Amino acid sequence: MPAAHTADGPLWTSDACGQDWPCPAVRATPTDAARRATLIPEFSRITRRAIRDLRGQPGGPDPVAIVRRFFWFLPLTDEEARAVALRLR
Ligand SMILES: [Zn+2]
């Protein structure tokens, strides 16, 4: 059975394709309003862990970039992404 496009810390790369997670296969999954409502608490937990794992890595993304990456399904401004990052760290 092929690996699923899932990921875990501390690297947060896709088990199937090796790209930064959420990888294009995950991001291509359509999300409607109901799905987004369940994704927000799920990705709040995941993003909190990802910030802890990724922010210390040399050349790694800063918390705002991590928030934008993990909340790809929300149209966040930089300001909003910054506010979320502060809440999650
Ligand atoms: Zn993948």
Image (cartoon, rainbow, N blue to C red):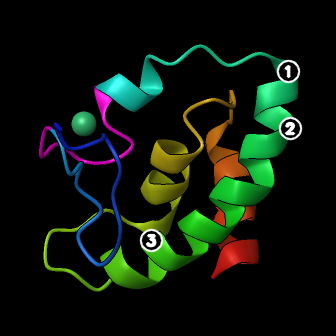
Q: Which residues are magenta?
A: 17-24
Label 2 residue SS: helix
In this image, 37 relative to 58: left or right?
right
Inter-mark Cα distance, 3 to 2: 20 Å
Label whose residue precedes the other's in the sequence (3 or 2): 2
Q: Quadrant of residue 7?
A: bottom left
Mark 3 is on which residue type?
Answer: Ala
Label whose residue precedes the other's in the sequence (1 or 3): 1
In this image, 28 relative to 18: left or right?
right
Image location (x, y in percent) of residue 44: 69, 62
Q: Which mark is residue 50?
A: 3
User: Could you tell me if the residues under marks 1 and 2 are in contact, i.e. CB atoms within 8 Å?
Assistant: yes
Task: Residue 19: say if magenta.
Answer: yes
Determine crowd level at label 2: few under 14, some 14-19, many 20+ residues with C-alpha closer than 10 A.
few
For mark 2, what is the residue? Answer: 37
Q: Please identify, in this view, whether the residue under mark 1 or under mark 3 is nearer the observer.
A: 1
Inter-mark Cα distance, 1 to 2: 6 Å
Q: Which mark is residue 33?
A: 1
In this image, 70 relative to 86: left or right?
left
